[in-house]
Amino acid sequence: MEIFKEFVIEAAHSLPNLPEGHKCRRLHGHSFYIAVHVSGAVNTKLGWVIDFAEIGDKFQPIFAQLDHTYLNEIEGLENPTSENLARWIWDRLKVSLPGISKIVVRETCTAGCIYEGS
């Protein structure tokens, strides 16, 4: 079974590797919707894969590091595309959250990415 918990961060970024004149090269912001997915067997006694609160607890330090920031200033996010952000989050959760199966990052209502590990 796969479950997920969603988070929203407000952050600014620019994409420095894009050509001059590209609108996303300029400083701009998003409400990033981030979903952390965890897969596993349902615990027959508890009736769940994992407590949603546990996912929230594991994500909290990441949320604190990302929310209301300029993402480019965070080590490892110098080119903070949705793809790089998803991988960056995965790398910070994979040890503390066994069963992580995917990270979904949506930067607009119609655009985002899904990362399922390397």
Image (spheres, grey):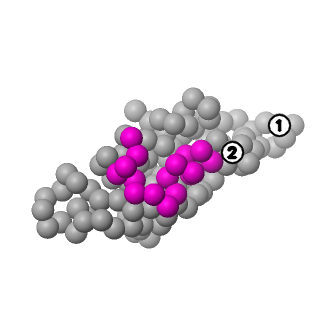
Query: Any magenta on residue 30?
Result: no
- Determine whether 41 is above or below 59 in the image: above
Residue 63 x, y percent position in the rendering: 56, 51
Mark yes or no: residue 60 visible. Answer: yes
Q: Amino acid at mark 2?
A: Asp
| Residue, disc 2 | 57
Q: Residue furthest right?
A: 45
35 vs 20, nearest the viewer = 20
91 vs 28, nearest the viewer = 28
Q: Residue at 45% of width from left, 57% of height from top?
A: 69
Give me the disc on residue 67. none
Range drawn in magenta = 60-75
Q: Residue at 83% of width from left, 37% of height from top?
A: 44
76 vs 114, nearest the viewer = 76
| Residue, disc 1 | 44
Residue 29 x, y percent position in the rendering: 39, 67
